[in-house]
Image: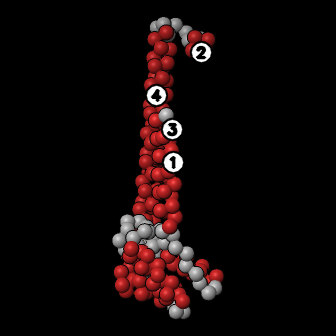
Amino acid sequence: MITSRLQVLLFSLTLLTGVGTASTITVQSFDTEIQQTRYNRLIYDLRCPVCQGQNIGESNAGLAKDLRDRVRSMILAGQSDDQIAAYMVSRYGEFVLYEPPVRPATYLLWVIPFLVALIGFGFTVIAIKKRGRRSLNNLQTASRADETKRADELLSSIKPNSPIDERDIT
């Protein structure tokens, strides 16, 4: 009896939570599908200034909603994607762009990951070569020790002043 009431209560809470979440979604209407496509691309390419790791399309922050509305109004006013991005950068800095532009000030941002990967690859190759040489040296040392031991056994098996027969050696 108690478990069925608890199940009904949990089911009701789940439904209420879903309705609250669904009501926050707003649909933007545009004159053309091209404008809608541009809008969708821009809101997912612009980072929310107050959220960690979210774009303005995914964020529920009030500022993100304002920025979505601003992007919509700028698109309807006929501004280009570059103009909209420039406006956002002038207002919030380059942080708002998920991909910073390539220019002399940002070359290091684009080059350092490749340099780190190249250096890591170089260290890996060097380590593999050293390990290969070390195991080869150990193998050669072990085979030399075996050969020396076998030669000592053969020499000790030879009696002094006796003729050497080839059958004794093998």
**Mark 3, residue position:** 4
Amino acid type, callout 3: Ser
Q: Sequence-wise, which precedes: disc 4 or disc 3?
A: 3
Closer mark to the observer between disc 4 and disc 3: 3
* Residue 113 to residue 29: above or below: above
Amino acid type, callout 4: Ala
**Mark 4, residue position:** 142
Amino acid type, callout 2: Thr
- 28 to the left or right of 105: right
Residue drawn at x 37%, y 86% is 90
Q: How far apart in space, not on screen, are marks 2 and 1 (Cα)?
A: 87 Å
- 43 to the left or right of 107: right
Rate crowding at label 2 as few (under 14), some (14 to 19) or many (20 or more) other CA atoms within 10 Å: few
Depth order, front residue of 83/120: 83
**Mark 1, residue position:** 11
Closer mark to the observer between disc 2 and disc 1: 1
Residue drawn at x 63%, y 85% is 32
Q: Which mark is residue 170?
A: 2
Q: How far apart in space, not on screen, are marks 2 and 4 (Cα)?
A: 21 Å
Closer mark to the observer between disc 4 and disc 1: 1
Amino acid type, callout 1: Phe
**Mark 1 residue element:** helix
Q: How far apart in space, not on screen, are marks 3 and 2 (Cα)?
A: 88 Å
